[in-house]
Image (spheres, helix red, strand yellow):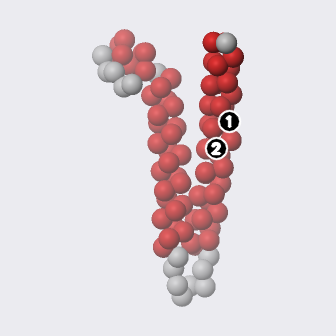
Amino acid sequence: MKILDSMLNVVLAGLVFGVGLPVIYVLALRMWDRADHVDSVIARRGTLAMAWTGFALVGIMVLVAILWITRKSLSHYLGITVF
């Protein structure tokens, strides 16, 4: 059962990072486009804020993933414990 649980964790992580982050990025691009192409009269600040929030979320998740992958090297060579 331990192998099955481990496989399930890998599949779920793959779905989150493999599908979830690109979807968040695409939605952020759509929000940015909607905020940019208004009739030059009223600016949509809410959609622009949502777009930047999506970009920030994707950037943070990429940074966390890089730190997770390199956590043992950081600990061994630099003495930095991240997680």
Circle 1 residues within 10 Å: few <14, some 14–19, many ≥20: few
Farthest residue, direction left:
79
10 Å neighbourhood of mark 2: few (<14), some, or many (≥20)? few
Q: Residue at x 63, y 38 (%)?
A: 16
Q: Quadrant of residue 7?
A: top right
Q: Secondary structure at mark 1?
A: helix
Mark 2 vs mark 1: which is more N-terminal? 1
Looking at the image, residue 60 sits to the left or right of residue 40; the answer is: left
Residue sitting nearer the eye, 77 or 2: 2
**Which x, y percent locates residue 38?**
60, 80
- Asked if residue 61 lies left or right of residue 4, the reply is left
Three-letter amino acid code at the position of disc 1: Leu
Q: Is residue 43 above or below residue 18?
A: below
Residue 15: give its label: 1
Residue 53, horizontal then vertical, whole percent: 49, 56
Res. 17 image quadrant: top right
The Cα atoms of the two marked residues, 2 and 1, are separated by 7 Å
* Residue appearing at x 47%, y 26% in the figure: 68
Q: Amino acid at mark 2?
A: Gly
Q: Residue at x 51, y 67 (%)?
A: 48
Residue 44 in the figure: left or right of residue 23: left
Which quadrant of the rendered structure holds the N terminus? top right
**Residue 74 vertical position relative to residue 20 in the rendered view, above or below:** above
In the drawing, what numbered circle is on residue 20? 2
Q: Secondary structure at mark 2?
A: helix
Residue name at image x 61 percent, y 51 percent: 25
In contact (CB < 8 Å): disc 2 and disc 1: yes
* Closer-to-camera residue (3/45): 3
